Image (spheres, rainbow, N blue to C red):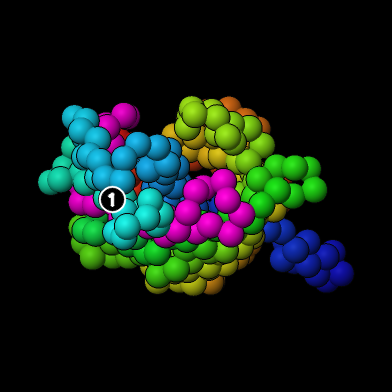
Amino acid sequence: MVTLLGLIMASCSKSEPLDATASEAADDVALTEALYDDAFTSLEIATGFAEIGKKSASIIDTCPLITITSPGQEFWPRNIEINYGTGCTGLFDVVRSGKILITLSGPRGTTGSERTLTFDNYHVNGAKVEGTYVVENLGPNGSQNNVFGVSLTDGKITFPDNKVITREFTRQREYVAGYGTWNPWDDECLITGVSAGTNLEGKSFTLTIVNPLQWHAACRFLVGGTIGFDVEGIEPFELDYGAGECDAVATLSRGDETKEITLGYRHPKYNDNN
């Protein structure tokens, strides 16, 4: 009886396996990270265009059309419209449609300046993206790296079957490379903060960045850092983006168990070709 009781106690103390439920919860979050970081990259590139040139201008490319205007007599504030029209295909076969709308209160490099990004019927690979994204220049930190406060409110991803993922977060992005250059693709940030929302199954979650997330503008996905998951009805686990490789591979872990997943701009539930 004592031996049997010991075996039962040992069994109960082990972590639950990383089942499909945990993997799906990670897929939900990994996709939202990719989509909102993609929007942030668009914000950074458009800001560069807005800080030079005339009070109003249109930048014509095969896709998108970027229009920049100053609503008043002064150069600032500035409004930017990034218009993907009814749909166009970019790098890595990512299809975007609709508009990204941005308001800049002042130059990106001025402490206290804010940039607000919203979406107008904006879709990425058939998923509708919503929310209000605000980026504030907090100035340099003790390491003399520029830091931006970033918040997402009313974030929502809607899929063709009307299932949704909701997301809100409050974060800081510390520039560790590329800040102040004219090349938007050399930017690198460390991201810290917390977020919350609901997944495709309607389960609430909270996320904590355990190790700072590493964002490189030139990479499709986050290249490093760890997120801790606390999902309703699931034992906590972590998502690790790796140690700096610019790839689409991440790892789930709980206790001694690990599982590799592939990141993408499409949710695996809706398209297996990521």
On the picture, is 177 further left or further right than 107? Answer: right
Q: Residues within 10 Å of mark 1 (few under 14, many from 20)?
A: some
Q: Quadrant of the C terminus?
A: top left
Q: Image height check: is 127 above or below 63?
A: below
* Residue 104: % across, % down: 42, 55
Name the residue nearer the viewer: 58 or 17: 58
Q: Residue beneath label 1, please?
A: 69
Instruction: Looking at this view, name the residue that lies furthest to the front.
Output: 73
Report the magenta residues as a range.
90-117
Instruction: Please tell me in which quadrant of the rendered image residue 5 appears.
Output: bottom right
Residue 106 drawn in magenta: yes
Instruction: Please tell me in which quadrant of the rendered image residue 121 appears.
Output: bottom left
Q: Image height check: is 186 above or below 201?
A: above
Q: Quadrant of the N terminus?
A: bottom right
Residue 14 drawn in magenta: no
Does dot 1 land on a helix, a strand or a loop? strand
Residue depicted at 28% across the width and 50% down the height = 69
* Residue 124: % across, % down: 27, 47
On the picture, is 17 further left or further right than 261? Answer: right
Residue 56 makes an appearance in the image = yes
Q: Image height check: is 104 above or below 218?
A: below
Residue depicted at 31% across the width and 46% down the height = 55
Check disc 1 and give the amino acid type.
Thr
Instruction: Looking at this view, name the residue that lies furthest to the right.
Output: 2
Residue depicted at 66% across the width and 45% down the height = 146
Residue 242 makes an appearance in the image = no
Instruction: Looking at this view, name the residue that lies furthest to the left.
Output: 86
* Residue 192: % across, % down: 65, 53
* Residue 105: % across, % down: 45, 58
